[in-house]
Amino acid sequence: MTAEKKIAISFLEMVASAQIEEAFKVYVAEDFKHHNPYFKGDAKSLKDAMLEDAQNNPEKELKILRSLADEEFIAIHSHVKQNLADLGFVLVHFFKFKDQKIIELWDVGQEIPDEITNENGML
């Protein structure tokens, strides 16, 4: 496993376990930007949103399903549940690295519905 894959996984695990300040301090570059359409594109805006989410969802669970590396890009496919009763979301985070720091982040997700027609499921 590449160092960048380890960093991306550790970053997501730390965020999911409410260690957000530390995750940003250790892994995020000063010139970081992200592409989540619900928040401004800077690190502080995303970090603040993650801190609020952690406060609202203290039972959050993250399960890493797959990870892929392509040069400076890492993709992490995961299942996130906000609480024990939640079916959750399937997410893919795309990280861009420079000097083993996260410089850019994209995320796409899909909520797991109550009923799934596809016999292969979403995980």
Image (cartoon, rainbow, N blue to C red):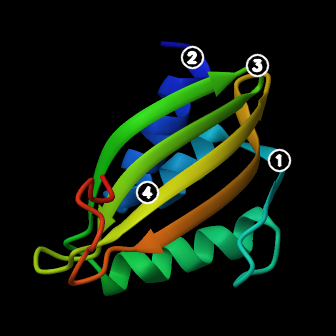
Residue 118 in the figure: left or right of residue 77: left
User: For mark 4, what is the residue?
Assistant: 15
In percent of width and height, residue 67 lies at 48, 32
How busy is the neighbourhood of tag 3: few (under 14 within 10 Å), some, or many (20 plus)? few
Q: CA distance from mark 1 to mark 3?
A: 21 Å
Q: Residue at x 57, y 79 (%)?
A: 49
Residue 38 in the figure: left or right of residue 118: right
Q: Earlier in the sequence, mark 1 or mark 3?
A: 1
Q: Residue at x 51, y 41 (%)?
A: 76
Q: Amino acid at mark 4?
A: Val
Q: Tag 2's secondary structure? A: helix
**Residue 100 appears in which quarter of the rendering?**
top right
Q: Earlier in the sequence, mark 3 or mark 4?
A: 4
Q: Is label 2 or label 3 in front?
A: 3
User: For mark 2, what is the residue?
Assistant: 3
Q: Earlier in the sequence, mark 2 or mark 3?
A: 2
Q: Earlier in the sequence, mark 4 or mark 1?
A: 4
The disc label shown at residue 30, or none: 1
**Residue 96 appears in which quarter of the rendering?**
top right
User: For mark 3, what is the residue?
Assistant: 71
Q: Amino acid at mark 2?
A: Ala
Q: Residue at x 76, y 19 (%)?
A: 71
Nearer to us in this view, 102 or 69:
69
Q: Amino acid at mark 1?
A: Glu
Q: Is label 1 or label 2 in front?
A: 2
Q: Earlier in the sequence, mark 2 or mark 4?
A: 2
